[in-house]
Image (spheres, rainbow, N blue to C red):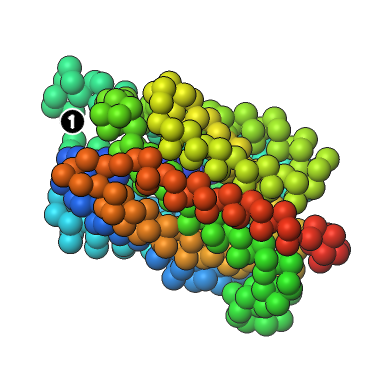
Amino acid sequence: MSAKFRLGTMMFLQYAVWGAWAPVLSAYLGDSLGFAGWQVGFIYGLLPIATIIAPMIGGQLADRYFPTQKVIAAMQLIGGVILLLGAAVTSYSAMVWVMLVYCIVYAPTLALTNSIAFINLKDSEKDFGKIRVWGTIGWIAAGWALFGWRVLAKSAPGIAIKGDTLFLAGIFSIVMGIQSFSLPHTPPKKEGTKPWAFLEALKMLKDRNFLIFTIIAFVVATELQFYYVLTAPFLTSTKIGVSSTSISLVMTIAQFAEIFVMALLLPKILPKYGIKKTMTLGVLAWPLRYIIFVIGTPAWLVVASLSLHGFCYVFFFTAAYIYVDTVAPADIRASAQSLIAVIILGFGNFLGANFSGWIKDLFTKDDITNWRNVFLVPTVLTLLCAVAFVALFKEKKAAAAAG
């Protein structure tokens, strides 16, 4: 099997694990287990917390001590077992501990899968999108698998599992752990003269242009959580009326759009227009989607607006990972990817998950949520991010740093 095929399979499974629980766990926690908005937000904030703590360890291990593929394999196998056990958990305190431990072993793999792909691709700007798109396909496959499982469970109740979303994620995680041993051998960089690779990656923030990029990426990441944490409850509310059985299926509209953008548009637009224009298009798509959520009618338009996620995520975050790879020194690339993961997936998502849960509670009275007011908040903030990015980010400096 070719390296690209193995890397594509890796991405498929990496995001199938995440996609099995992230889009719909909030609806399960709130509707089935009765958790409050702030409790759901805190649980969603555990992966960001883990992303702050763990990737610096994962990047350090892969950059200095162990082959990257073995680090990924070990973490996915451990994580899979934790998820299978966590599917039976129903209390808030127990769920917090299960998800915290799980997230600590999963979080490093988000950066390491990017790193191993960049290292083993000859032209990352051209090929990374084609590899990463398999992650989106995996996310979709997980959503469809969960939908199929729930439909089957209605006619065969014996296969129904209360925590089916976590159980399915656990299965994908174990499969990925096994598959990871077949990834291209990627040993640590022996030429690295300084032992603490993550500290070297932190020094990249001294570059004004990289710092500006990082700050804006952080703020955008906080607003991403309004989508991940609140879209499923919003769509299943009486205002929109999507059923709990089909919610995982409906949510994959966003990933179908992501495939289109990543496979067909990103490889053409990024080389032609550069990082700044590509990422600007991504930032602008965010307020457009949230404006439609604010209007909230007709229901078909709200559902259709999920397709804007493809532009939001790919043109901003996928392009961001490519940008980091172009400016990072070769011997700290895994740690540089870990750094951006800490900032975006860690601090940004942690703040965003808790902020979005708090905003939902703020605009909820007598169990009725004013979704218009909820989504006005990310609309304004993402629009400000777009203006700031256009005004402050200088692509010429980025190009010079890459050279």
The crowd level at tag 1 (other Cα within 10 Å; few <14, some 14-19, many 20+) is: some
Q: Residue at x 34, y 54 (%)?
A: 359
Amino acid tagged 1: Ala
> 185 above or below 285?
below
How many discs mark residues in the rendered view? 1
Q: Position of residue 140 (x, y in %)?
A: 46, 31
Q: Quadrant of residue 321?
A: bottom right
Relative image position of residue 367 (x, y in whole percent): 18, 43
Judge whether residue 359 can be spotted in this image: yes
Position of residue 15 in the picture relative to residue 34 (left or right): right
**Taking 53 as reference, is 1 left or right?**
right
Q: Is residue 188 visible?
A: no
User: Looking at the image, which is closer to me, 244 or 181?
Assistant: 244
Quarter of the rendering containing residue 115: bottom right
Residue at the image position 73 percent from the left and 58 percent from the top:
391
Residue 6 against residue 90 in the figure, above or below:
above
Of the pair 375 and 147, the residue shown nearer to us:
375
Residue with the most extreme top position: 155
Q: Residue at x 44, y 46 (%)?
A: 376
Q: Quadrant of the N terminus?
A: top right
* Side of 270 relative to 334 (left or right): right
Q: Position of residue 217 (x, y in %)?
A: 59, 58
Mark 1 — residue?
160
Does 373 sit above or below residue 142?
A: below
Q: Secondary structure at mark 1?
A: loop
271, 111: nearer the viewer: 271
Residue 206 percent location from the top left of the image: 70, 77
Q: From this viewpoint, which residue is outermost toward the bottom?
A: 194
Quarter of the image for the C terminus: give it: bottom right
